[in-house]
Image (tube, helix red, strand yellow):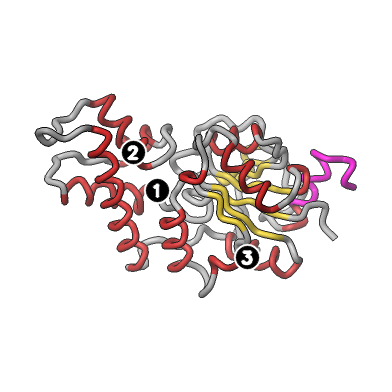
């Protein structure tokens, strides 16, 4: 018996390392297709990740860098058109097998299902991108493992606003104390905490490793696998080498002593 009922997952950078070799490449393909000479290198894209949401990211780039736009085209309309093209290129990359789940993710998902722990997603991405990812990684039918998929275009405000987490909680019919969150970024952590979710595990990646995560229950460089230990950046693994359901249970009890 575990002292929590659901795990709510972020997607990009958390379930899979989608940003550098997935979304970034897809953005650049969309720019080239539109005849634009824009190219987001790894460093530039890292800066743009401070902005959540793909359309918003394009708009922020236009506002900050003021690149040449096609004649007679409004920046907002261009951002929307480029984002649609980017989603198409991203789906192509996924279908080609360019991206996989992060180590330990499938193990923890399987363990949760076996234990009867519910699974949900809270992401700034679109439902289409989420389903495209889940259709091409892990096991067949992986999308069906998630009872709730709360996405950025379903709410008024994207992360770091709490809206998408509040939507996930509403659709799960659970209080915040009954859930654990797995995130990878400061905006995601802030969104979860603003929604009242206290037990947040952060699995950093190359883009988010230097961000501040003082409010997280645990910060690690991944979920790890048996025999492949993770590095702990904040918090305690209590003698374990990887993150498992027992780890999450200990974190919940520490944050919510009444659940013991």
Observer-nearest residue: 171 or 176? 171
Q: What's the magenta region?
A: 248-260
Circle 1/circle 3 CB separation < 8 Å: no
What whole-number distance in Å separates the C-alpha atoms at marks 2 and 1?
Answer: 8 Å
Horizontal and vertical percent position of residue 30: 23, 49
State the residue lying farthest toward the left.
Answer: 71
Q: Earlier in the sequence, mark 2 or mark 1?
A: 1
Q: Is residue 114 visible?
A: yes
The reply, left or right, for residue 43 in relation to residue 189 is left
Horizontal and vertical percent position of residue 169: 67, 47
Say which quarter of the image contains residue 78: top left
The reply, left or right, for residue 187 in relation to residue 165 is left
Task: List the residue tagged with mark 2.
Answer: 45
Task: List the residue tagged with mark 1.
Answer: 19
The reply, left or right, for residue 11 in relation to residue 93 is right
**Which quadrant: the N terminus?**
bottom right
Q: Residue at x 80, y 48 (%)?
A: 250
User: The residue tagged with tag 1: helix, strand or loop?
Assistant: helix
At label 1, counting other C-alpha atoms closer than 10 Å, the crowd grade (few under 14, some 14-19, many 20 or more) is many
Circle 2/circle 1 CB separation < 8 Å: yes
Above or below, 180 relative to 130:
above
Is residue 27 within the magenta segment? no
Q: Earlier in the sequence, mark 1 or mark 3?
A: 1
Say which quarter of the image contains residue 79: top left
Above or below, 260 relative to 131:
above
Q: Residue at x 74, y 58 (%)?
A: 245
Q: Earlier in the sequence, mark 2 or mark 3?
A: 2
Say which quarter of the image contains residue 206: top left
User: The residue tagged with tag 3: helix, strand or loop?
Assistant: helix
Q: Residue at x 72, y 38 (%)?
A: 198
Observer-nearest residue: 200 or 126? 126
Q: Main secondary structure of the magenta part?
A: helix
């Amino acid at each position: 018996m575990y002292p929590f009922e659901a795990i709510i997952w972020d997607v990009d950078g958390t379930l899979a390392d989608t940003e550098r070799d997935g979304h970034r490449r897809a953005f650049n393909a969309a720019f080239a297709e539109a005849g634009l000479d824009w190219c987001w290198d790894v460093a530039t894209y890292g800066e743009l990740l401070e902005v959540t949401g793909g359309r918003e990211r394009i708009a922020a780039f236009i506002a900050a860098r003021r690149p040449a736009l096609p004649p007679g085209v409004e920046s907002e309309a261009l951002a929307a058109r480029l984002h649609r093209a980017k989603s198409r290129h991203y789906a192509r990359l996924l279908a080609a097998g360019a991206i996989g789940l992060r180590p330990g993710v499938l193990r923890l998902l399987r363990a949760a299902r076996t234990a009867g722990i519910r699974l949900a997603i809270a992401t700034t991405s679109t439902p289409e991108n989420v389903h495209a990812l889940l259709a091409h990684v892990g096991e067949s039918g992986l999308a069906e493992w998630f009872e709730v998929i709360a996405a950025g275009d379903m709410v008024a405000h994207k992360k770091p606003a709490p809206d998408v987490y509040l939507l996930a909680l509403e659709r799960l019919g659970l209080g915040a104390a009954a859930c654990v969150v797995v995130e990878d970024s400061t905006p995601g952590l802030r969104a979860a905490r603003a929604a009242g979710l206290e037990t947040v595990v952060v699995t950093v990646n190359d883009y988010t490793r230097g961000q501040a995560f003082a409010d997280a229950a645990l910060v690690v460089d991944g979920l790890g696998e048996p025999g492949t230990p993770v590095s702990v950046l904040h918090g305690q693994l209590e003698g374990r080498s990887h993150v498992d359901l027992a780890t999450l249970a200990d974190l919940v009890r520490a944050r919510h002593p009444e659940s013991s």
